[in-house]
Amino acid sequence: MEECSMSGDSYTPQPLDRDARFYVAGHRGLVGSAVARKLRSEGFTDVVGRTSSELDLTDRGAVFAFFRETRPRYAVLAAAKVGGILANSTYPHDFLSINLQIQLNVMDAALEVGVERLLFLGSSCIYPKFAPQPITEDSLLTGHLEPTNDAYAIAKIAGILQVQSIRRQHGLPWISAMPTNLYGPGDNFSPTGSHVLPALIRRYDEAAASGADTVTNWGTGTPRREFLHVDDMADACLHLLEHYDGAQHVNVGTGQDVTIREIAETVAAVIGFEGLTEWDTSKPDGTPQKLLDVTKLTDSGWTAGISLEDGLRSTVDWYREHAGALRG
Ligand SMILES: NC(=O)c1ccc[n+]([C@@H]2O[C@H](COP(=O)([O-])OP(=O)(O)OC[C@H]3O[C@@H](n4cnc5c(N)ncnc54)[C@H](OP(=O)(O)O)[C@@H]3O)[C@@H](O)[C@H]2O)c1
């Protein structure tokens, strides 16, 4: 998608006011909790959030009432219905409908009260299944999506368009970021709802604890994936809000990928699982490779700092410490 000339483009990125109110939508989730941690550690004094039971973001009236009451100056939209291949392919309508509703409600209400800087978070699944690798931002809408998560992807593409339309029609300097696969403390480790890396951590940890000889993973293990620690993601969010302005979304990743087989071996080693790994090739692999081109992000002055091995170790530690209180 071409970057358009917009009135929002006249904005010059600058440091955010640490005392202004900052709303993190989805502040209990993997990304939102990391963003809230990052903001507080960077001196933001008025970070607000609401759980989904306090404020259901699909309830349009309640969302407008919340924004009129709290009037945040900045916002990160990290609330979404999120899941792995199984959840996405089983409940496509939920992923489409709930995410469209959350995005429309939050952005329309934020527009009404004039939120100055808003960062919308999409996902790398917005890109065509066979997009040239590494995937540049320009690949958007150039081919067919991966069918297992097309409904979710279309909702996220609509979110990018919403940010661009608000920039063009209302001149607000809002931006969008498309993260690669994320992992870290606070992730969803549930057997049916989780992404590949937390699913692997749980599977290998349970196998090690039960003394199982074998772990069976879905697919062939050959697809290549990129993983970014969520604390790096949160750092990138603040960086973009303070250093980037433009209609085009920005990829956020490490710029390096590994095979699922390699990641499974690393997880097994970090966990201490000494048995065999088998691959159930009757199960789908998903997209063969997904590596983001992060040139735009790098050019803006940011690169990832947490290595996969370090990030995995701290995530496994967190998983074990919270084993009795995980979501899902
Ligand atoms: N995880 C990844 O690998 C990844 C990769 C790329 C992009 N992203 C993007 O990052 C964003 C956040 O993902 P995540 O991994 O942090 O997801 P997550 O851990 O599942 O967190 C999502 C949060 O959204 C909130 N939420 C969901 N439905 C809601 C509703 N109806 N009303 C209010 N709040 C609601 C939940 O709040 P409660 O906890 O209060 O219920 C939850 O904390 C998403 O846009 C996702 O597309 C994630």
Image (spheres, rainbow, N blue to C red):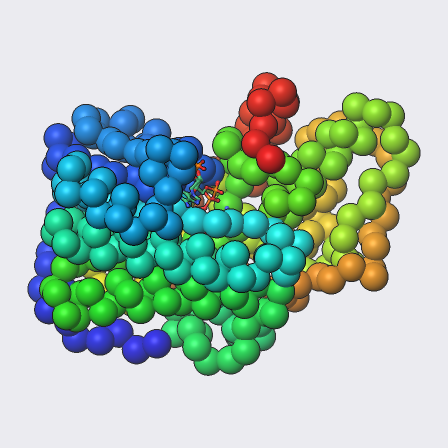
Tell me if 328 is positioned left or right of 103 in this view.
right
Look at the picture and state if 92 lies above or below 44: below
- Residue at image position (15%, 43%) is 68
Q: Is residue 130 among the parts visible in the rendering?
A: yes
Q: Residue furthest front?
A: 61
Quarter of the image for the N terminus: give it: bottom left
- Residue at image position (31%, 69%) is 161
Seen from the viewer's position, the closer of residues 297 and 322 is 322
Q: Is residue 298 among the parts visible in the rendering?
A: no
Q: Residue furthest right?
A: 213
Residue 140 in picture, x, y percent from top left:
42, 73
Q: Which quarter of the figure has residue 318?
A: top right
Residue 132 in picture, x, y percent from top left:
53, 74
Image quarter for ligand 1 equals top left
- Residue at image position (69%, 34%) is 202
Tell me if 149 is positioned left or right of 63 in this view.
right
Tell me if 303 is positioned left or right of 7 in this view.
right
